[in-house]
Amino acid sequence: MTGKTLSLEDIQNYDFTTIILFVAPLMFFFVGLEYYLSRKQNKNLYSSKDFLASLSIGLGNIFLNGFMKIGVFIVFLFFYNLAPIKIPITWWSFILCLIALDFCRYWAHRLAHEQRFWWSTHVVHHSSEYYNFSVSFRLSWTQNLKIVFFLPVILMGFHPLVFLIVHQIEVLYQFWLHTELIRKLPKPIEYVFTTPSHHRVHHSTNEKYIDKNYGSTFIFWDRMFGTFQLEEEQPVYGITKPVNSHNPFYLVFHEWIEVFKDLSKSKSVKDVWQILFGSPVEKHKEDLRQTEG
């Protein structure tokens, strides 16, 4: 199946207004509802400083994405025009794109936990010691670096319009996963889809939970690749090396600062490689041992 070369002018015929902006009022409604229910149930799910940090990071992310939108489109257009086939925009192309993108998101997410360079683009999302809907706002201002993991989906021939709509649906799906109030769902749902129970595991620092449940929309990738973990004990949220700050700029960039500090002390190519692509968990444990020693 072939298709004509797509240009930026063609893309401008579509309305690429961010879907997230349309649903933002609904998201804030559910944040308010969760806060109300948590207070009614005497659960300490929110902190005002933590919430304001999450909100600031989320607004910054929306601003940067809007600023970088045309650049991202151009990258997608370039790789779409390289695709040997062009998949038409149909109902089934959205389903296929969702499955393909979710697979790529699994591996991008996994590498973002296993390698310090990519962890630096993701750590802010895990920095809160609370777990509520507003934590979903904590998306890194440098996360667009991970676009490289999604280019294979474009090269498969999915139209950039299809990709961008599916990608925003995937991001929106993450919102409802960040809550303590929704417990375990019926087994068929828990087996196929990522649920709040699965994602609570992912956000915890419990030893048995670390680096588990990377799935975005589907949890079966974790079952297939050996990273699945049921929620058994109560999760303890945050990161293995707490940030102890509510400054949004520091929350976004603190790991980048640490990486560049370590790079300045490197003495060999091997050191540089280990700093950039070594395990962040092992690095933080090593720092903790040195501090205690």
Image: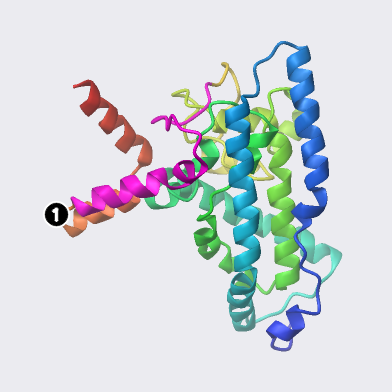
Q: Which residues lie in the magenta part?
A: 236-265
Residue that badge 1 annotates: 267
- Say whether residue 109 is visible: yes
Residue nearest the observer in this picture, 218 or 141: 141
- Residue 158 lies left or right of residue 67; in this view the side is right
- Extreme residue toward the right, this view: 91
Seen in the picture, residue 211 relative to 184 is either above or below; the reply is: below
Quarter residue 74 falls in:
bottom right
Residue nearest the observer in this picture, 94 or 47: 47
- Residue 274 lies left or right of residue 192; in this view the side is left
| Residue at 47% in and 48% down | 112
| Residue at 73% in and 47% down | 172
- Say whether residue 188 is visible: no
Q: Which amino acid, by three-letter code, is at mark 1?
A: Lys
Residue nearest the observer in this picture, 90 or 206: 206
Position in image of residue 210 (x %, y %): 47, 31
- Extreme residue toward the bottom, this view: 4
Position in image of residue 99 (x %, y %): 69, 55
- The secondary element bearing badge 1 is classed as loop
